[in-house]
Amino acid sequence: MKKSLVALAALAVAGVASAQSSVTLFGVVDASISGYSSTSRDLRPTVFPNAFGIPTYLNQGSVKVSNRQLANSAYNSSRIGFRGTEDLGGGLAASFWLEAPISNDDGQTGISTFARRSTVSLSGGFGELRLGRDYTPTFWNDTVFDPFGTNGVGTNLISTANTSFGAFNGTAPTAVPGVPNVSTSNYVRASNSIGYFLPPNLGGFYGQVMYAFSEKNKYSPAIATPGGDNTTRTGRYIGGRFGYANGPLDVAIAYGSST
């Protein structure tokens, strides 16, 4: 009997300990049948030879390009991730978040990187301090107020333009097929970042600030810089966001500087 009571007591202690922490597997699998088409028209008229010998120009008419595909992430971004929280006592909690993109239409991209989000954080009555790869404050304003959540064909023009000009923003080609390359583009997310979030009990006011390191070598004096070395601080981000939400009202302003 005594041994049984000891075993029960040990189980009770283990139950209390496990209740203080949690790990969650989560994700979204989104598939769609999508169709796209675009038409280009030549608006210049056909020009015939004349007395001045100007070459003939023949109107090229119009060209229509269409595509049908089974796609993923048409409404929600397909992803899989792990997140966990550990209660440290005294109102403090430590947590982690690892989230990977997946391509369920062809299975090419799986958990090869946690390029969507990779953070650890400490939270409490002071707010939250978050370290790692995360959304930038300026992108939060873009995606929160976009009815389509910056996803699919209905994405707002700011997000669409950024995707189209990704190479200009520093996005490098994928080195290994199926493995996302986070590059140094930080319009959506910034790597190597330190972020701070205000606590949620401020009567509807919210906000965050972020600084992301470029992690580039800097030489002093500058004349000692080796030829071809990148000293432009590519990848650095500084930004912040502040807003107020109450019922259907939600307004926010954000500012960011990206190198």
Image (tube, rainbow, N blue to C red):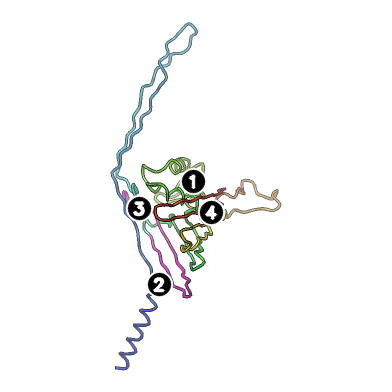
Please give the label number shown on residue 101.
none
Disc 1 marks a residue whose amino acid type is Thr
Of badges 1 and 4, the one in the foreground is 4
Secondary element at image label 1: loop
Q: Earlier in the sequence, mark 4 or mark 3?
A: 3
Disc 2 marks a residue whose amino acid type is Ser
Q: CA distance from mark 2 to mark 4?
A: 31 Å
82 relative to 216 in the view: left or right: left
Secondary element at image label 3: loop
Q: CA distance from mark 4 to mark 3?
A: 28 Å
| Residue projecting furthest to the top | 51
Please give the label number shown on residue 240.
4
Please give the label number shown on residue 21.
2
Of badges 4 and 3, the one in the foreground is 4
200 and 236: which one is in front? 200
| Residue projecting furthest to the bottom | 2
Q: CA distance from mark 1 to mark 4?
A: 23 Å
Q: Earlier in the sequence, mark 1 or mark 4?
A: 1
- Residue 184: in magenta span: no
Please give the label number shown on residue 78.
3
Q: Are marks 1 and 4 in contact (CB under 8 Å)?
A: no
198 relative to 100 in the view: left or right: right
Q: Are marks 4 and 3 in contact (CB under 8 Å)?
A: no
Q: Earlier in the sequence, mark 1 or mark 3?
A: 3
- Residue range in magenta is 81-106
Numbered label tally: 4
Q: CA distance from mark 2 to mark 1?
A: 38 Å
